[in-house]
Image: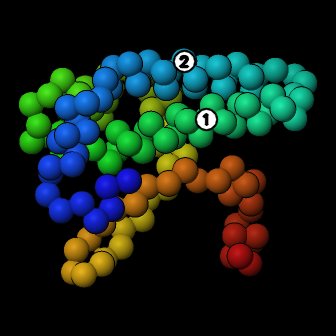
Amino acid sequence: LLEGTEGPYIPHRMLEALNVEQMASTVSDLYNAYLAEMDKEDHKEEELKAADSMLETCHSYYILFLSLYPYASTSSTKAAEDIIGIFEENAFFDEDTLQSLDKGTGRIEFNRNSKLYKYYFRIPSICKRLNDQEKQNL
C-alpha cells in the first residue's frame, strides 16, 4: 500500500483523513456477518462468495491499519491514536477477531535500492486446505 513511500508525508495525510473508529466498526460488523454465514449448515455458492468478499474487505482494512501503524507514533491525529489502540490496547476488536485477521495476513520483507519494505497480503483460503506435502510440492 505504501510501497516506495519516502518519509511520513503520505501516511500522515492518510491518518488526517481516516475515521479509524468507523472503519473498525465496519470490520467488526463484516467479520461477525462472515462468522454467522460460516456457522450455517447449508451454504449456497453465492453465499460463500459473499462471505469471502466480507472477509476480503476485513483483511483489506486490517492491512491498511498494519501499513499505517509504523507512522502512527509520529502523528497527533485521532486516527493515529486509534491505530495505536488497535495494536497496543486491543481497542475496537475482540481478541479472537484480531487474531483471526492477523493469522490470515501474510507478511514479507524485501530489499529494493538498499531500503527494506514490508508487504502485507491476505493468505488465500486455498493455502489453509493444503497439507505439508502439497505445500512442499508447490
Q: Is residue 69 visible?
A: no
User: Quadrant location of residue 65?
Assistant: top left
> Looking at the picture, how far across and down is residue 59, in whole percent?
51, 40
Looking at the picture, tell me which residue is in the foreground, 53 or 129: 53
Mark identifier at residue 76:
none
Provide the residue designation for mark 2: 29
Number of marks present in the image shown: 2
Mark 1 or mark 2: name the one nearer the start of the chain.
Answer: 2
> Looking at the picture, how far across and down is residue 1, in whole percent?
38, 53
Provide the residue designation for mark 1: 55
Give the quarter of the figure containing the C terminus: bottom right
For the residue carrying disc 1, how many other residues have a C-alpha within 10 Å: few (<14), some (14-19), or many (20+)? many
Looking at the picture, tell me which residue is in the foreground, 127 or 48: 48
> Looking at the picture, how far across and down is residue 20, in whole percent?
32, 26
At a point 70% along the width and 19% down the height, the residue shown is 36
Left or right, 104 with respect to 102, comes to right
Q: Is residue 112 above or below residue 36?
A: below
- Report, in whole angstroms, how far the alpha carbon at label 1 lies from the one at label 2: 11 Å
> Under tag 1, what secondary structure?
helix
> Under tag 2, what secondary structure?
helix
User: Quadrant location of residue 71?
Assistant: top left
Question: What is the three-letter code of the residue carrying label 2?
Answer: Asp
At a point 20% along the width and 40% down the height, the residue shown is 13
At a point 74% along the width and 22% down the height, the residue shown is 37
Q: Is residue 101 visible?
A: yes
Q: Is residue 21 above or below residue 122?
A: above
